[in-house]
């Protein structure tokens, strides 16, 4: 789907986002469901409640755009994020209460879409060999300036796919290693290994 098509479909659901500029944004009033937990909103969305789904999209879409931007690059990030939520609406029955929180499930759906996209462009090795957790310096602690931050973003983009995803979830999305493992569908020690190797590679790239 094109960005224009996806945007039109989201606007049909009344979705608002920082990158969906509309002339009537100032008149938009959040529904009373706005403070409800994600799981409650998703339960209502499963019953066809578009107001509940609009809140979920507004609440999470910018984060999913950011995630896609870091994993696949900025050019396709908005398209991917919109496709994730469109498919989520079309297949909303696939989320089942009691089988985990909504946020990890949503991130897992988004990551799968990102991986599908990147694997159409190249073959990506799967890295899941367990190693000891790296106790070294957090490479993100070196970000004291915009220049260093830009160098770090460029370095993260050069990491192997699963290292990049683990680093992104752990540092940019503030997830624990266990939460990242749940999203990635991997063992905890495998994700810890990816974090170790990712940090080591970043130090090499930034040195």
Image: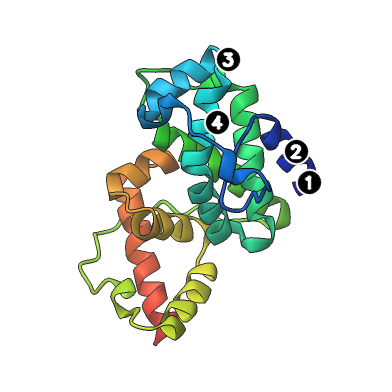
Q: Position of residue 138 (x, y in %)?
A: 27, 71
Identified at 46% across, 55% down, the residue is: 165
Asked if labels 1 and 2 touch by Cβ distance under 8 angstroms, the answer is: yes
How far separated are the C-alphas under marks 2 and 1? 6 Å
* Residue 72, picture quadrant: bottom right
- When asked about the image quadrant of residue 139, the answer is bottom left
Mark 4 and mark 1: Cα distance apart in space: 18 Å
N-terminal-most mark, 4 or 1: 1
Please name the residue shown 50% across and 67% down the image: 159
Image position, residue 11 (x, y; %): 68, 36
Label ID, residue 54: 4
| Callout 2 secondary element | helix
Q: Which residue is mark 2?
A: 8
Reading the chain from its start, which is encountered first: label 3 or label 4? 3
Marks 2 and 4, how far apart at CA:
14 Å
Q: Secondary structure at mark 3?
A: loop
Q: Which residue is mark 1?
A: 4
Q: Residues within 10 Å of mark 4 (few under 14, many from 20)?
A: many
Residue 142 higher or lower than 6, as above or below: below
Please give the residue where the numbered disc 3 appears in the rendered image. Answer: 48
Looking at the image, residue 202 sits to the left or right of residue 49; the answer is: left
Residue 31 drawn above or below residue 198:
above
Give 146 or 166, whichever is nearer the viewer.
Answer: 146
Within 10 Å of the Cα at label 2, are there few (<14), some (14-19), or many (20+) other Cα atoms?
Answer: few
Q: The N terminus lies in which quarter of the figure?
A: top right
Q: 185 or 152, which is in the foreground?
A: 152
User: Marks 3/4: CA distance?
Assistant: 11 Å
The disc label shown at residue 132, or none: none
Label 3 Cα crowd, 10 Å radius (few <14 / some 14-19 / many 20+): few
């Amino acid at each position: 789907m094109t960005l224009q098509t996806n945007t039109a479909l989201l606007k049909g659901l009344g979705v608002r986002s920082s990158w969906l500029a509309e002339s009537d944004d100032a008149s938009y009033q959040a529904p009373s469901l706005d403070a409800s937990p994600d799981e409650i909103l998703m339960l209502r969305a499963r019953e066809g409640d578009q107001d509940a789904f609009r809140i979920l999209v507004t609440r999470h879409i910018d984060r999913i755009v950011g995630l896609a931007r870091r994993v696949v690059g900025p050019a396709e990030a908005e398209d991917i994020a919109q496709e994730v939520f469109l498919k989520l609406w079309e297949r909303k029955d696939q989320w089942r209460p009691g089988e985990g929180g909504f946020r990890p499930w949503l991130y897992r759906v988004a990551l799968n879409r990102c991986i599908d996209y990147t694997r159409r462009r190249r073959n990506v090795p799967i890295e899941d060999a367990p190693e000891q957790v790296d106790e070294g310096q957090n490479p993100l602690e070196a970000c004291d300036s915009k220049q260093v931050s830009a160098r770090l973003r460029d370095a993260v983009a050069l990491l192997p796919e699963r290292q990049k995803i683990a680093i992104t979830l752990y540092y940019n999305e503030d997830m624990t290693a266990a939460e990242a493992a749940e999203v990635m569908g991997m063992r905890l020690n495998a994700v810890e290994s990816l974090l170790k190797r990712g940090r080591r590679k970043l130090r090499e790239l930034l040195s």
